[in-house]
Each structure stands twice: as C-alpha cells, then as structure tokens.
Image: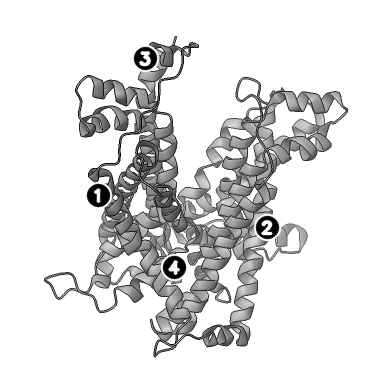
Amino acid sequence: MSAVLTGSAAPAPRRLRPPIVWGHWLLAGLVFAFLFLFLLLPIGEVIYTAFVTETGSPTLGHFSNFFGQSLLRESLINSLLVALASVFFASVIAIPLAYLTVRFEFRGALLIQTLGVLPLIMPPFVGAVALQLIFGRSGSVNLLLNDWFGFTIPIMDGLVGVTFVESIHYFPFILLNLVAAMRNIDGAMEESAQNLGARGWRLFWRIIFPLSLPGYLAGAALVFVKVFDDLGTPLVMGVTNMLAPQAYLRITSVGIEDPLGYVISVIMIVLSILALWMAARVMKGKDYSTLQKGGNSLQRRPLRGLASVFAYAWVVFVLVVTLAPHLGILLMSFSKVWSFSVLPDSYTLEHYATIFTDSKLMVANTLKYCLMAAGLDVVLGTLIAYLIFRTNLPARRWLDYTASIALAIPGLVLAIGYLRMFKGVNIPFTDTPVISTWVLIMIAYAVRRLPYALRSCMAALQQVHISLEEAGQSLGAGKVSTVRRIMVPLMMGGILAGFVTSFITAAVELSATILLTSAQSQAPMSYGIYLYMQSIAGRGPGAALGVVAVVVVAIGTYLSHRVVEKSRAPDRAAQP
C-alpha cells in the first residue's frame, strides 16, 4: 500500500479481477435492458419505419420522395451548410482564445476560462431572440451603424443569423477541448522547433496545432452534431428550410405516421454518426502522444508590443459578442417597451411577477426532470464503468459503445422514436397513455446525456487503484460495502462532474421536450420559454424565465464545483 501511495520502485500490486458472478450478469442485464428499451428500440423503430410501406413491405420509395421534393433537398443542403459554417466560425473564435490562454500570460486568461462555460448555460434559441434585438435589422448595433455611417449589417437574417447564433453558443466545445489538448503538449517539441528556426505563425500551424488536433476534432465534431440537432434556434428565427424544423413540422402537422418525418430522422442520424466517425478517422494511424505532460508543457510567455494590442482587442471583441445574448435577455426581461431603439424605452418588474405567478410549476418541473435524469445518468455511468474495469464479463465494452450511441442521436429523433414506440401503450393497470406522462421527458434527458456522465465516471474509476478495494476486502468488507465506502467516495469528484454536465445540458434541452410535452402542467422552463418567445407580447416574460433558467443552472454549477473542491481538499492536504 505504501509503495502505491509514495510512488516508490516496488512492483505494482497484481490486478486480480473477480470471477464472473451472477450479480455482475444481473447488473449488466439491467443496464442493457434500459439501453435497449429507451435507446436502441426507439431508434430501430424510426429506422424501420423509414424503410417499409404501410403494409410492412421493404421499400426505398420514401427516400425517393424525400429527394424528389425541392424543399427537402434544400433543407438538407442548408443544414449541412449551417453546421459546417458554424464549425468554421466557432473555430475562428476558439482557436485564438485557446492559444492565448495556454501560450501567453495576460490578465484576461481567467475571463476566457469563464467564457468556456458561460454560453452553454443559456439555451441557444433564447440567445437568438436577444441577438435579434441587438444585431437584427432594427437592433441596437444596426441603429447605431445607420445613424453614424449610413449602413446596416444583416447578420441576423435567415441562415446567416442561425449560423451566427450557433457559432457563439457552441464555440466553447472547441475551446475547452483545445485548451486541454494544448496543455498536454511537451514543451520540448516547441523548443526544438524554435531551435530549427520556426517562429510565430509557422510554429503554431506546423507544431502546436497539429499536436493538439485530437482535442480540436473532438470539439469540432460536437459542434457539428449539436448544430445539426438544434431545433429551437431555427424555429424561433422563422427558418424552417432545415432538416430539424422539417422533421418537427412533418410529425406535428402531417402526423406520427408520416414516413418523410422518419426519412429525415434517418438522414440526421447518419450524418451525425458520419461526423463523429470522420473525426476519429482523421486521427487513425497517427501518433499525437508526447513524452512528458504538465511538468514540461508549453512555456507561457508575456505579451509585448503590437501582439499584446491585438490579443487584448480580440479578447474584448469576443467578450462583447459572447456576452451580448446574456445582456440582451437581461435587458428584455426588464423592458416594458423595446422597439426601434438602442436600449429599452422603459423598464418594469411585471415580467418577473408574471412568471413567478404563472410559471412556478415550470421551474419545479425543470428541477425535477433534470435532477432525476442526472441522478440516473451517474448511477448508470458508475455501473457501466464498474462492469468494464472491475469484472471479466465478455463483451462488457459493448455497454460503453451502446451508451455512447446517444451522442450521435438528435433529441428530436429520439422523441419521434418514443412517440412511435409507445403509441397506444398505457401504463400498467391504468388507462393513462405512456406518451402523456412526464416520465418520457425525464428518460429522454437521461439517455441523451448519458455519454457525458459515463465519460466522467469511467475517468474517475480509472484513477481508483484496485489495491484500495482489495485492501478493504482483506479487512472483511463485503463487495457492496467496498463499493459504497471506498470506490464511490473516491470517485465522487468524477461522479459530481458527470452529474453537473448532465444537469446543465438537460436544463436547456428543447428538441426532445417540444415533442414529448403533452400538457402545460408537464412543461419545463425550456418549453415555457419557447412558448413565450413565439409571440411579441410574451417575450418579456419569456426573457425573465430565461434569466431564471440561467441563474438556476449557474447556481447548480457553482454549488457542484464547491462540492468537488471540498471533496478534493483532503487529498491535497494529505500531499506533502
């Protein structure tokens, strides 16, 4: 034990995997049954429906109908263009910020780290409404440009506006992954390149960025999938010629039996999986590893002269643009009248009074669904991690692969699968249809966020040495007691990280929510905000509810980080 803790040269303890027992099979069976029922089966139902006729005969006619309609072909092209453009502009924002944070010393580094989370705690469709007030044709920026210079910038119109909103909202995925990758680069490689004459731009593009490519591709793939899946932003901005809005409109207007809705869903699944596969394919067969991490990472240097001016100008520009949705939604929540003016003409607290009177149930529903979904995710994530790393079950890795499929499944598609699969099914011993309950909303949240929680739980368990569990068992602790008193407490930091990630992202989910919410009493805040934003008269209360949603998520994030830090405090205190 002491050799493990002190890092001496003593041989590592022999890893003894417990024999396969019936309890492990039972756990694996329960986990797989959940994934099969609420992930594989609904998606299989969607795919099956897209390839069969009403009589159940195989057909490709539905796909011929899809490509035969100009609107649907245009929607496919538009979705691809918006997703790719959003990845490009998100990269333009994130790559300089990541490099500045890792490579140089300047006062804005902490602010950039805060930006890494801030845009993600606001639903993108809420930010779209706020950005229309600031950057729209009659928004604050264009009013000023017209008064001062006599021209305007139509940045919030149509597909350009959707791309602008998505880029601002999702660039933190690239930023966070790229910063983590750059911090793991061996500084000796940079020094060797400098000794050979590489400097500045050439050093970055030939050495630093290629070595951090895995982090960049991971973030870029996530941005592509998230933008491709987003339903709320195009709907709020009145853009319906994209795949997600078309799938939603086909299912809600034509009906659940409309085959084209399922064809669109299959195309969305295929393209999402293809994006993730291509990101992995680019890295296949290439070695990005370095000999040292942390101790000899890239050396941070002070900014001087013109480089400092450009760096601070870029940071200020990104700050202004990134904070614009938050500032806009805050002003809108207090504004009584805001039309054709740079700032609201008058202010009021009536919108907050309205939501605290009419929308208290939405806040409670959000907390209920998200807490239950996040709790279910960390339980499933811990179980899957345990089965993978602490048992000898055959094909146990397939639990990881199966759970990770949810990352590529759009929320809208999963919701369509639930509606199709549970159509006509009642809760046992009752006459209540399953699709009319809030349970499916919560389960959809859990399934969609399971990959995030699973990654955190797996990383946490890998850092728990098996000898610690063996020591507990040698002192008489049973398997359940060992897991409860040793493994779970040591994994707590990772478990909480997974819980927070699931909670934050579920709280702003709209794609699945908009289809699965069957009654006003079931509506969470994201659905309530969407309903408010559909009318000009209701945008004030919608903005106030959006502010409440941001505050709830921010408080949850802050408290969880405090808990994580406290859980790590004993470990830091024990270090010499």
- Eye-nearest disc, 3 or 4: 3
Position of residue 438 relative to residue 96, above or below, is: below
Mark 3 and mark 4 lie on one chain; the one further toward the N terminus is 3
Tell me, for residue 26, which label it has, or none: 1
Report, in whole angstroms, how far the alpha carbon at label 3 lies from the one at label 4: 50 Å
Q: Nearer the viewer, mark 1 or mark 2?
A: 1
Which tag, 1 or 2, sits closer to the chain's start? 1
| 458 lies left or right of 220 | left
Q: Are marks 4 and 2 in contact (CB under 8 Å)?
A: no
Which mark, by number, is residue 1? 3
Is residue 413 in sight in this rendering? yes
Q: CA separation, marks 1 and 2? A: 66 Å
Residue at left 66%, top 61%?
84
Looking at the image, do the residues carrying marks 3 and 4 touch, with CB atoms under 8 Å apart? no
**Circle 4 residue:** 412
Discs 4/2, front: 4
Q: Are marks 3 and 1 in contact (CB under 8 Å)?
A: no
Tell me residue 395's x, y (percent).
41, 50
Query: Disc 2 designates what residue?
Result: 144
Which residue is found at the position 43% from the left and 58% from the top? Answer: 543
Q: Amino acid at mark 4?
A: Leu
